Image: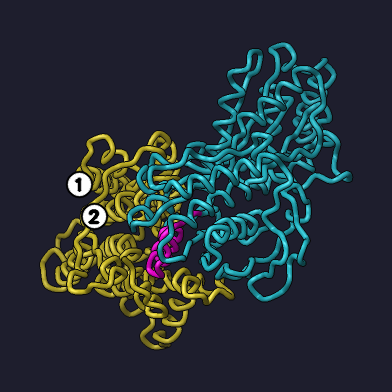
Amino acid sequence: MTTDIGLWGVPLAILGGAIRVSTPFIFVSVGEALTERSGRVNLGLEGTLVFGAMSGYAVAYQTNSAWIGLLAAAFFGMLFGLFHGYICKLPKVNDIALGIALMIFGSGLAFFFGKPYIQPVAPHLPAISLGWWSDVPQVQAALRVNVLFIAGIALAIAASWMLKNTKVGLTIRVAGDSADAARALGIDVNRVRLWSTAAGGALAGIGGAYLSLYYPGSWNEGISSGQGLMAVALVIFARWSPINCAYASLLFGGAGALGPALQSVGVTQGYYLFYAAPYVLTLGLLIATSSTTRAMTAAPGELSITK
Amino acid sequence: MTKIWTPNRRQFLKSTAGVAGLAAASSILPGGIARAAGLTVGFIYVGPKDDYGYNQSHAEGAAVVKKIPGVKVVEEERVPETVDVQKTMESMINFDGATLLFPTSFGYFDPHILALAPKYKDVRFEHCGGLWTEKNPKNVGSYFGYIGMGQYLNGIAAGHATKSKKIGFVAAKPIPQVLLNINSFLLGARAVDPTITCQVIFTGEWSLAVKEAEATNALADQGVDVITCHVDGPKVVMETGAGRGMYLCGYHANQSKLAPEKYLTGAEWNWGKVYTDMVNATLKGETIPNFVRGGLSEGFIKMSPLGPAVSEAARKQFESTQATILKGGFSVIKGPLKDNKGNVVAKDGEAFAETDVKLESMNYLVEGVVGSTS
């Protein structure tokens, strides 16, 4: 049934891991990139992600349809985003502090409502087998790609194109780079940011639904190990470009698969160190790509972390 | 300028005196509030109590206790192994009148239970898994079950089911109880076929859903076709394993509902019996021994009913081994046995029975286990 693939298991696991683990990172970071390009930081996406995971699972179980669950997760994620965007509109509200509050609030609310859904088994989102050309079962397993992964990559490309080439993109960028210039152009800055944050929230909700409805595919209170928070950090790493966000997520997912994969082929010493691989890699790349002259050039000028 | 409420010394003394007074009142009154309404028992869990795992096994035990007449049960879940558990215990004692507490997570013992026990001498603290010694307070007890025997029986079912001769184990942390489970699982399988190896992956934490799924996938990629685990909630490992076509051996609780066709058997806790015995002893006014241990024969653990994938030969060996274990004196770790680094852990003729306290400080993986403790 299975073929002995020995050490080939490691690159294969990294590939499979990149595909399986990266999807929530892609959705959350692309969403956050949109939000931050409009000049606002939403740190609460971890809470949105957890709530999306819970609501997606609960609705999928109740309606017996993973797709309706996914829609529900996006909807609740959008509500969280709208809430953040609306409160931040009020004078003298700090978006970072509010984000932290929302992060804790979202998780707590999800745990509260999610209690009855820990045991039931909800339907999963479908996957597409891209490994038909291989007769090695491990390759087929690694290349079972969820539709959301493909959607995530497409989304990253579309968002990049949108920011660069469309009027909506320009509006978002202006609002993010200079609120004064935007106002001079007659753009309602707060409205742009409100909807950018809402979009980011909806995407984070979808990222959460991926966790509970596909991989690992069940709801419990430990479902997120900080993916939402890490994805927000990836946005800075990716220099606010959605397409780079997708690359960064893939890298992060692949590196995360290194620890289990190495143990499975018998490299068992020091696994705690391998588990730190994604973070070491991120740190290394940040140092390698940093520069004293053009360090934060890509950062939107209105962001409260750069001001 | 800003008014942040900071308690001055007088207010602080007043409020602490109030708390101390409350505590004193409940200890002066015979049995406090509790005796009036029978016995109040408190259960504290580290995770959600319906996680298909460790916490669920304890909550099922608590549900049995609830049925005993005259006993009131209070529960709190998701209590971290920090000073939070002390607050929970104190509120159960002072407000619910609990006089028998079961804080079930390993990390509650030291320093939290040990800190509170001298303060509440009328309360009995029963902790799961800790090593009680003579130096500890007398109103503290420790109980645990020899679930390694269950993993040995899991191993027998796995040994018959595996075709690739590779079985897998997703483990949280390399602590003695986990290592004993891994070793027992392999030795059970080797009782069927001595060429079987067991691949172990440590995830580093008790509950890490994505990493557990990744570990299961990595094992499947290496041709492992039977899997078990020792993490808080086995649901993710079981579902992912079944998705990759692996046979499953359960742990903590019965997970057969998750994949009935693939589920062979499982090592389950049977806390209902343990808790009933302890609560009944307390109701009769007897003292529970400070150090309680038990295995299959004492009813501390049980096996899930064998699944449809278990062959006739497997069933026979499983049942005869179970009967031998039930007679008592069975040793999983017996010589000649080496660890997977080549050191001798049991000399020829040497055997460690399940009751041997030395097993509770195990720090090696036996020959045939692919993995490392650090």
Q: Can residue A205 be found in the magenta stretch?
A: no
Above or below: residue B41 compared with residue A116: above
Drawn side of residue B280 relative to residue A36, left or right = right
Q: Secondary structure at mark 1?
A: helix
Drawn side of residue B57 relative to residue B143, left or right = left
- The chain letter for the residue carrying disc 1 is A
Quadrant where the C terminus of chain B sits is bottom right
Drawn side of residue B139 relative to residue A26, left or right = right
Numbered disc total: 2
- Amino acid under label 1? Trp
Q: What's the coloring here?
A: by chain
Q: Residue at x 53, y 53 (%)?
A: B156
Which stretch is magenta?
B211-228
Chain A drawing hue: yellow
The image quarter containing residue A271 is: bottom right
Q: Can residue B226 be found in the magenta stretch?
A: yes
- Amino acid under label 2? Ala
Image location of residue A19, percent across then percent down: 30, 68
Chain B drawing hue: cyan
Q: Which residue is mark 1?
A: A67
Residue B271, numbered circle: none
Q: Nearer the viewer, residue A202 or B254?
A: B254
Image location of residue A112, percent across then percent down: 43, 36
Q: Decide if residue B85 is in sight here.
A: no
Whether discs 1 and 2 lie on one chain: the answer is yes
Q: Which residue is mark 2?
A: A199
Question: Farthest left residue?
Answer: A166
The image quarter containing residue A180 is: bottom left
Q: Residue at x 58, y 69 (%)?
A: B368
Q: Nearer the viewer, residue A294 or A70?
A: A70
Image location of residue A93, percent across then percent down: 40, 51
Q: Residue at x 62, y 36 (%)?
A: B44
